[in-house]
Amino acid sequence: MASADEGSPAEPGPPPSGDGPEPARTTDGAAAVIAGDGTVIGWTRGAEALLGYPAAEVVGRSAALLLTGPPDARRTAAVAARCRAGSGWSGLVPLRARDGRSLDIDVRATASFLIAGREGFLVSGRELTPHWTMRGSVLDDFLTRSPVGMAVLDPDLRYLWLNDTLERFGGVPREQRLGRRPSEVLPGALATPIERLMRQVLSTGEAITDYEYLGWSWADPHRRRAYASSFFPLADAGDRQIGIGYMVLDVTDRWNARRLLALVNEAGASIGSTLDVQRTAQELADFAVPRFADFVFVDLLENPFGGDRPGAPAPAEGERPAMRRAGMSSVREGCPEGVVRVGETVDFVPPPHDAHFLLNGDPVLLPALDPDSHGWTVEQPERAARLREFGLHSLISVPMRARDTVLGLTTFMRSRNPVPFDEDDVAPARELVARAAVCVDNARRYTREHTAALVLQRSLLPHTLRGGTALDVASSYLPADAKDGVGGDWFDVIPLSGARVGLVIGDVVGHGIGAAATMGRLRTAVQTLADMDLPPDELLARLDDLVLRLSEEERAGGPAERGGTTVVGATCLYAVYDPANGSCTMARAGHPPPVVVTPDNTVSFPDLPTGPPLGLGGLPFEALEIELPEGSLLGLYTDGLIEGADKDLGRGMERLGRAVSRGGMPLKDLCPAVVRELLPVPQPDDIALLLARTHRLSPEHLASWDVPVDPAAVGETRAKVSRQLEAWGLEDLSMTTELIVSELVTNAIRYAAGPVRLRLLFQSALTCEVSDASNTSPRLRHARTTDEGGRGLFLVAQLAHRWGTRYTPRGKIIWAEQPLP
């Protein structure tokens, strides 16, 4: 860009020294056109950007004004002659920028050319920026301070050079390495694969990078470390292999992080496979041995404290916790290191700590155990003896905490593994225990709710079944499999008036406490409705209305907030058996039909109208009456008994029919045998089975009379009753029975329509029934002292154990029952 009076082809300028910056060309350039007389006739924006001069200040002026020193006419002429000869020229020229700075510009001039009739030269330039060249001392310092271990070996794998980092990694002084092979100075298990890889690189000429391996060094022989190495061939100027170089990086932290992640992921698949507290604790102990420790035991608090655990205060300072050993595992068969066995109580905490440290949740690391210290010999002498006997030398104890609740303590110990626990082992121990603690807490919560649901459900189911003399009854109930919780299956046997018996079975959709609570409400409702002597179809209609109201209340109040569960979808079957004539009237609401086995071993499922499930509303229920011969077997069951693995209800009913038709077995044995045969494995739903064998009321224990609609017939009726009681040997009940008969018959004659009929039933109790053709229900009154009447039903209520009214298609029946003497 300026006259070439600095530098020439014979004088390119001084070479850079090794102590300072060496010129390096940049990529940005500028250009100008200079006439043969040295005048600038062209100026580009790049030139303006480089030196700061605008074109107006440069064009038309001499290029010598851009030089930092005086021009050299001789050299300028030599450069011009070279360019006129067509060769061009390049060199370093110091130029002055507009702000006064001196810049070293790499200038290039082209061969001369004509422009507008004038001779011109195109001159371009680029500023030079320095880059550093290193002296030997700088390179040595770089290699020495590098965090990467480096070494150079000859083709015979003998050390020629190594840096301080590699010397520190191996723990072998440099003097003892130089001239020797890796196998002569490093542990054999570590040197053998390294030499094998080096020979591979020498034979193939291809580098091997990032080879990771575990090992130890003489610098720290008791700690395992991870390294990543790269091996590459070294060649001279003739591309002949003259040796091998390798670099080593300590990646123990990265390896520990990967190990922790892998350990936690593997633990997730091995710990917490069930909702059983003790099994979860044992899974933790089994998983950690021998992966992490040689002896592990898990102790859980009898009463966890903190979090949402009411009534379990935190331990006081110096107090030992009350725990129970839930899991234990060892590399030695039988866990001889343990002072207590699984299931026994324990109060161990690592000395000198007490139970208070469980609140902090911080692990306790004891890298070296001294069984002769005061904390072991005085406070725990038996454990101190086990430390000596089995060489237990290192310990980590981690409190088990989940959801701000202290659950217990897990202790890891080493004996056969000579490497003591250190700070790097605390994180894996903490992660293992944290994962197991969540599983243990989930198991505790589930067990608590599941147990409460079982207790609630079994408290709502009948403890004893009373079929009287009309039925022999037996039942079997199995709760759902543990993973699904408790369901809502229920059954009941309800004594009714007139020696009749009501049988009911039902199934509430869902599981858990909500289903059990709903089941209890339905069972209570059925008992109340049955006590009103409603026929089966009407009872189900009333129950359907009740369930519909309950469901609407739960939806309006938010079942999720109130903890309720909708009962839409509940099923029920209700049957009434009358031993006087052997009739059985039944109706069902979406429930499977009953199974009937007659004395000749004929199996049938009555074609009972299905009816909708409870809670739909607006749909009718139909009843069916069948006659059961003496000794017939009636079976009521829930759908879980017949679903089976194939989910085919038709085949399930066939299997049930074959199972209940086996003769010669008492009901109390037949019922569980049927369940075992149909369900050989745990079931996903509740199972309920109710079996009843029928008996007819003996004609000798039944007496009935038609009563004329005439007040005078009351006396004669009383006499007949007296004679019948004498024949039955019930003279002690004659007086009260005659008074009851007198009042009931008198009321029927006076207030109802005929015909009037009296019936006595002698069974487990003495029942007196008076039927008439009126649908008007009698009302119990408390007459005043001045009233002449109104005391009839009051007297009946006082004399009878219980009394009531039931309606028939032809009227009503008023009945009164007395217990036998």
Image: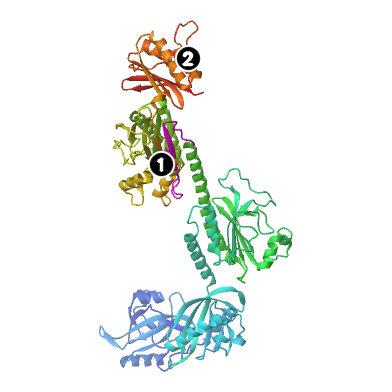
Q: Are marks 1 and 2 in contact (CB under 8 Å)?
A: no
Quarter-wise, where is residue 78 in the image?
bottom left
Q: Residue at x 46, y 25 (%)?
A: 765
When the figure is inspected, residue 663 is found, relative to residue 737, above or below; the finding is below
Q: Residue at x 33, y 37 (%)?
A: 613
Report if residue 334 is visible in the image.
yes
Circle 2 residue: 795
Element on which disc 1 rests = strand
Give the image location of residue 217, x and y in percent: 59, 78
Quarter of the figure with the N terminus: bottom left
> Is 266 positioned to the left or the right of 357 in the image?
left
Q: Is residue 792 magenta?
A: no
Local crowd size for mark 1, using a 10 Å CA cut-off: few (<14), some (14–19), many (≥20): many
Give the image location of residue 438, x and y in percent: 52, 54
In this view, the residue in front, 763 or 286, is: 763
The residue under label 2 is which amino acid type? Answer: Leu
Circle 1 residue: 689
